[in-house]
Amino acid sequence: MEVKCFEKVAKSGMSLEEAVKNKLVPCLTLQDGNLHLRHNHNYYYQIQGQLGITQRQLCYFVVYTGDYNNIFIEEIVFDDIFFRDMVCKLIDFYENCLAPEIILNRRQRNLKCRDPPSILRAQEELQLRKSSKS
């Protein structure tokens, strides 16, 4: 079970659906009148990681927004393909970003962190997407 509390929604007096429409709860989306955890949100990655590491198949994602709103509960099912892709990216990050920093200790010597080619490519792609939208 993963529980999130959104005090801002409780204080606003809005229903959870209204809060999602007003972008006060960015982790949720409203599709066909139903609320869902966004699959590109950090909470989804967190849950998939927890399910994969603990070898569980199901997690209840619970959102509490005050005593006057209903508690939102969504069953999140383990996605093996999503988890494997996430693990590959984490291994890449560890091997190409974290481990070299641990060994070279550049930050403590006031040197800039070295970005591996995969990070530089991702940054370039992000800039291209941003420039094509404007």
Image (cartoon, grey):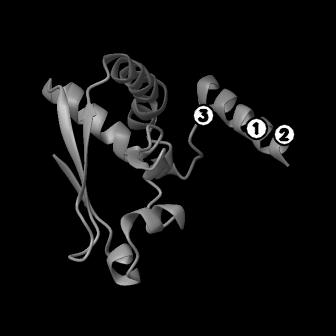
What is the secondary structure assignment of the residue under circle 3? Answer: loop
- Judge from the rendering whether residue 55 lies leftward or rightward of residue 64; answer left or right: left
Q: Give me the C-alpha separation between circle 1 and circle 2.
A: 5 Å
Near-viewer residue (127 or 48): 48
What is the secondary structure assignment of the residue under circle 1? Answer: helix
The residue identified by callout 1 is 129
Q: Residue at x 22, y 61 (%)?
A: 71
| Residue 40: image location, x then y, percent | 48, 39
Please say if 106 is above or below 68.
above
Corner quadrant of residue 16: bottom left
- Judge from the rendering whether residue 46 lies leftward or rightward of residue 119; answer left or right: left
Near-viewer residue (79 or 119): 79
Q: Residue at x 38, y 76 (%)?
A: 8
The residue identified by callout 2 is 132
Amino acid type at image mark 3: Asp
Q: Give me the C-alpha separation between circle 2 and circle 3.
A: 24 Å
Amino acid type at image mark 1: Arg
The residue identified by callout 3 is 115
| Residue 94: image location, x then y, percent | 40, 28
Say whether marks 3 and 1 touch (CB < 8 Å): no
Q: Nearer the viewer, mark 3 or mark 1?
A: 1
Say whether marks 1 and 2 touch (CB < 8 Å): yes
| Residue 131: image location, x then y, percent | 83, 43
Q: Residue at x 29, y 69 (%)?
A: 65
Please say if 18 is above or below 100.
below
Q: Residue at x 14, y 29 (%)?
A: 54
